[in-house]
Amino acid sequence: MLNVVILAAGKGTRMQSNLPKVMHSIAGKPMLEHVLQTVSLLEPAAIVVVTGHGASQVQKNFGSLPSLTFVTQSPQLGTGHAVQQALPMLKQADDSVTLVLYGDVPLVQASTLRLLLNDASKKLCLLTETLSDPTGYGRIVRDDKGNVRAIVEHKDASPDQLAIREVNTGIIAGPTSCMQRWLGKIDNSNAQNEYYLTDIVGLAVSEGFAVTTAQPSHAWETMGVNTRAQQARLERAWQAELAARLMDKGVTLADPARFDLRGNLDVGRDVFIDVGCVFEGNVQIGDGVYIGPGCIIKNSSISDGATIEAFSHIDDAVIGLGANVGPYARLRPGTNLASNTRIGNFVEIKNSVFGESSKANHLSYVGDAVIGNNVNIGAGTITCNYDGTNKHKTVIEDDAFIGSDTQLVAPVTVQKGATIGAGTTLTQDAPEGRLTLSRVQQKTVFGWTRPRPKS
Ligand code: UD1
Ligand code: CA
């Protein structure tokens, strides 16, 4: 039975922020959410988040998750003191194991934690790493045989110990009952007058209890965030990992260093993604899709063979087979484009369905509309869907042709095969197969001359 304690009480002073540190994001998601999602893969019996600064803000965001409880640590007297606060919430059973994680170390992977937990019902298991610069970290002190003897904090370490490059990542697991016993014995007689969680290692060793170590597969798994600069570095490291995973699935990224994924991206084969695109929420992309530079795509699905040209903004839209969108198109929520549609530059679409092979190539606004198949919407066409109070629907049936600079004052229907003359303000339904237009008679003013400059 697994208990997880996530330490998140630290102030995060160096973030210079009103937001609690663990609410700051990596890849568009709060750091604590990354940890919680990873932890949920381990199916723990209890998760206890130790909060302190900004406790209510953190609880408000995550309060509803099952098997998750919060304890507040105030004042913050050290990592050992923090875990002590969580003890009453832990599930006790003979085989109970407790895993301690940090809320500001967001990217540790479930595979690494499983490795650490392998022996955790019989041994105290430490996730350690060997760093070229171990400054600031607790050092892993081993004896001649290589057995772990203790963790010594940087500020308490002797010159010899400071030379040790194997460090404590902070992630520790062991039997719940032992952790409880050892935590009852720690004190704060050290350089920082704190109750160190790391002191349980020496206590385990003194009882003859086995202590073992494991290492993460990637350096970024145990990178913590204390500053905005560290947050930015971790963001880049994680984006590089996400980019690598996509390339492994057959995506071409014009430049993996200029790619941002803030959510989930499902991809087909032979997808091309140019530089500077941002993907948010859940996005699905089919085979052979081309995405030009600078596109922002959120909660949308793009079918096989579609092309999204540069600088298009797509939110909550469905794009059909072989469709062609952009450059500079804006597809707002509720846009549904059937196959072989064509949406060109400076076209905004909201809550509208486009049938097969229909086109709006230039400078239009289409909102709350149902467009049939093979419809051509001329440049500058506007659906006047909003009367200031309510939204109204525009229907344009199959094979209709809407001349340029038309205003469709909804509710209004353009029937099958109708043609609307350029410049029309359509206020009544246009009948099937006919030309309908509203146009002020053209006139020429004879005898008019241009004003001359005043002398
Ligand atoms: C800790 C470890 C050190 C390890 C390092 C890795 C101890 C004594 N030291 O040091 O061995 O190398 O992490 O980064 O454990 N926290 C609380 N309550 C507290 C104190 C801390 O919740 O009273 C939380 C912080 O929010 C943070 C984590 O615990 O998420 C670590 O605290 P931090 O002060 O960064 O520990 P270090 O001194 O860096
Ligand atoms: Ca730290």
Image: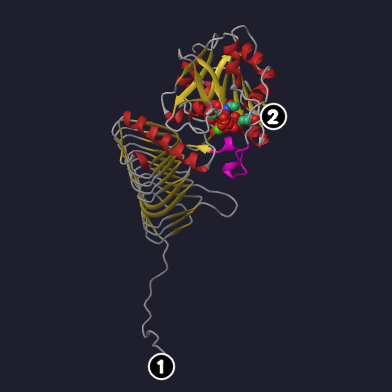
Residue at x 38%, y 84% (from the top left corner):
450
Instruction: Establish if 447 lies above or below 171.
Output: below
Residue at x 64%, y 11% (from the top left corner):
177
- Residue marked by disc 2: 72
User: Could you give the CA–CA distance between mark 2 and mark 1, rounded to whole angstroms?
Assistant: 83 Å
Element on which disc 2 rests: strand
Q: Residue 107 or 177: which is nearer the viewer?
A: 177
Q: Is 125 placed left or right of 75 in the picture?
A: left
Quarter of the picture for ligand 2?
top right
Question: Where is the C terminus found, in terms of image quarters?
Answer: bottom left
Q: Where is residue 104 in the image (x, y as percent from the top left)?
A: 55, 32
Q: Residue 348: give its label.
A: none
Corner quadrant of residue 217: top left
- Magenta stretch? 11-24
Instruction: Establish if 209 lies above or below 455.
Output: above
Residue 280 visible in the current orientation: no
Q: Is 374 placed left or right of 29 in the picture?
A: left
Element on which disc 1 rests: loop
Residue at x 53%, y 12% (from the top left corner):
120
- Residue marked by disc 1: 455
Residue 446 visible in the current orientation: yes
> What's the residue type where badge 2 is placed?
Thr
> What's the residue type where badge 1 is placed?
Ser
Q: Position of residue 216 (x, y in %)?
A: 44, 23
Q: Is 195 placed left or right of 345 in the picture?
A: right
Corner quadrant of residue 256: top left
Q: Where is residue 376 in the image (x, y as percent from the top left)?
A: 34, 50
How crowded pointer 2 is (Cα within 10 Å; few <14, some 14-19, many 20+) is rated as some
Q: Please count the marks in the image.
A: 2
